[in-house]
């Protein structure tokens, strides 16, 4: 997957694409895979890097959404659980089963939670991944040695899926290319072309070169997440707001603050969200918050009150709670929630189901949803696009479509044993991982490599600062960049980090 090869396909502006997708997050990439695998000529353009926004800042769970049962969203939970099962079958190299426990500190809580989780199991049907059951206090403490012991009555254990969101996004991009799609990052749509009032194409700017491109398409789909309103206003300048963004943050601390391989779910916090404490990449993720009224932005930052909120809630359930100084990294993401018709100030209560809108000009907008249901959302969007464009009917094949495996790093390490060396003692990546990403996964910036091709920046910010100059120099050499490029990249990357530089 090389950007230079793919961008050549835009040079011929006379060709007509069947489907043009605006946005390269989970939904847009899923649409590109679906459309290309049906045989439709597909173009995807992303203004930043693949999954640079919300889609790389999730809780890292492929899940049905236990808390949605409380809201009565049975259909959403059922669909999500079945998509969870399909994704575990189609990408076993990227998605695995994770045990989680809902702890109980009153006698009635373990059986009460267990009843709800039995319904959760039932809704998964044949695509279930393991039955829930009650665990006693001693078993729970063996699983989570740092869980608060006083008054612990046991808990209810169940299973969900865990994944690496940015890596799955890259697998989707590669799979789309494998089936003939043209997917390009750092190429933003700035205008829509129209003929007789109907959208017939896009105008886009390559942010790396400044060059402008035009492309014609039979169907144009906007899958731009929290930027959906801005995209819709390229079509209808007076379009009313559709999205109510909500910010959720996560803190990354040492895994010893929970211990073991089992995740923790607290079903009710002060703002109505659940609290997760999840082992991931030899760290512990603490999340999440629900902060309404935030403006759409590509790189949101955790607010100090959000950090304090998570630390305070974690302290209620952990014997030795993490302190501000224990945070290795922190990241924020914006949920692209679709506003309910009557409006709501409580974004935690807004449905995570998706919505598809068709404008008078023919622009298709898909909004809402979540990572777990990306495949179903994509199928829905492509079905709509095929009808709008009058494309020849073609069935969706993604329910059983295996996603591309990422194997170049293994080949490099076998060929050169020195590449097996880790890039930093605190990070789980080798020199082969970095080199393979640069050569085969279309990164254009240092941030692309350290935040999404690897997850260095969200595992340990201090370690990432240390390796940044060396990785930037390697990128400059591999990509043929001029002098000064690496220095600029290091500065840009470190400006995106959340935590202050040690000693600053």
Image (cartoon, rainbow, N blue to C red):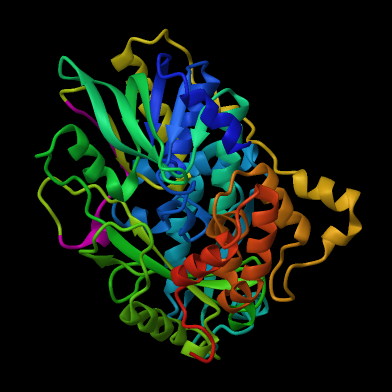
Outermost residue, top side: 392
| Residue 144 quadrant | bottom right
- Residue 255 is at least partly visible in this image: yes
Q: Nearer the viewer, residue 403 or 361?
A: 361
Q: Is 352 inside the magenta-drawn segment?
A: yes
| Residue 239 quadrant | top left
- Residue 410, given in percent of the width and then of the height, sits at 81, 49
Vertical comparison of 15 with 266: above or below? above
Count of numbered badges drawn on the protein: 0
Vertical comparison of 309 with 160: above or below? below
- Residue 313, given in percent of the width and then of the height, sits at 40, 82
Q: Is 427 inside the magenta-drawn segment?
A: no
Q: Is residue 300 left or right of residue 452?
A: left
- Residue 67, given in percent of the width and then of the height, sits at 37, 59
Q: Nearer the viewer, residue 71 or 326?
A: 326
| Range drawn in magenta | 345-359
Q: Nearer the viewer, residue 88 or 106?
A: 88
Q: Is residue 315 left or right of residue 457?
A: left
- Which residue lies at the image location 69% right of the left edge and 45% below the top edge? 439
- Residue 438, given in percent of the width and then of the height, sits at 66, 50
- Which residue lies at the image location 46% right of the left edge and 18% below the top edge? 12
């Amino acid at each position: 997957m090389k950007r230079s090869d793919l961008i050549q396909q835009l040079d011929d502006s006379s060709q007509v694409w069947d489907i043009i997708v605006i946005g390269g997050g989970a939904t847009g990439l899923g649409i590109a895979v679906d459309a290309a695998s049906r045989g439709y000529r597909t173009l995807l353009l992303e203004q930043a890097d693949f999954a640079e926004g919300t889609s790389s800042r999730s809780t890292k769970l492929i899940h049905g959404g236990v808390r949605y049962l409380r809201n009565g969203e049975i259909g959403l939970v059922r669909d999500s659980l079945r998509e969870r099962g399909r994704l575990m079958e189609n990408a076993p190299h990227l998605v695995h089963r994770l045990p989680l426990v809902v702890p109980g500190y009153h006698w009635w809580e373990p059986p009460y939670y267990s009843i709800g989780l039995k319904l959760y199991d039932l809704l998964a049907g044949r695509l279930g991944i393991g039955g829930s059951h009650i665990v006693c206090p001693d078993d729970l403490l063996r699983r989570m040695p740092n869980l608060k012991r006083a008054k612990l009555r046991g808990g209810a254990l169940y299973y969900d899926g865990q994944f690496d969101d940015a890596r799955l996004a890259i697998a989707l991009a590669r799979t789309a290319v494998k089936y003939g799609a043209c997917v390009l990052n750092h190429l933003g749509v700035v205008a829509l072309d129209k003929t007789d009032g109907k959208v017939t194409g896009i105008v886009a700017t390559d942010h790396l070169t400044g060059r402008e491109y035009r492309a014609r398409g039979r169907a144009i789909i906007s899958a731009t997440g929290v930027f959906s309103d801005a995209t819709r206003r390229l079509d209808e300048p007076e379009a009313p707001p559709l999205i109510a963004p909500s910010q959720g943050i996560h803190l990354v601390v040492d895994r010893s603050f929970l211990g073991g391989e089992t995740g923790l779910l607290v079903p009710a916090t002060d703002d109505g969200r659940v609290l997760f404490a999840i082992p991931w990449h030899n760290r512990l993720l603490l999340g999440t918050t629900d902060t309404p009224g935030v403006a759409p932005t590509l790189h949101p930052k955790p607010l100090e009150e959000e950090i304090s909120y998570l630390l305070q809630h974690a302290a209620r359930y952990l014997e030795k709670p993490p302190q501000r100084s224990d945070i290795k990294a922190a990241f924020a993401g914006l949920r692209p929630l679709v506003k309910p018709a009557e409006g709501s100030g409580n974004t935690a209560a807004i449905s995570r189901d998706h919505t598809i809108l068709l404008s008078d000009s023919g622009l298709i907008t898909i909004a809402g949803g979540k990572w777990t249901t990306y495949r179903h959302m994509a199928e829905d969007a492509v079905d709509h696009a095929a009808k709008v464009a009058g494309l020849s009917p073609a069935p969706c094949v993604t329910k059983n479509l295996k996603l591309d495996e990422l194997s170049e790093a293994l080949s490099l390490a076998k060929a050169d044993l020195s590449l097996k060396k880790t890039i930093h003692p605190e990070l789980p990546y080798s020199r082969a991982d970095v080199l393979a990403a640069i050569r085969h996964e279309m990164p254009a910036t240092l941030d692309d490599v350290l935040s999404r091709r690897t997850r260095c920046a969200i595992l340990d910010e201090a370690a990432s600062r240390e390796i940044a100059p060396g990785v930037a120099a390697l990128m400059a050499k591999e990509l043929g960049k001029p002098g000064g490029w690496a220095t600029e990249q290091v500065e840009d990357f470190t400006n995106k980090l959340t935590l202050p530089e040690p000693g600053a």
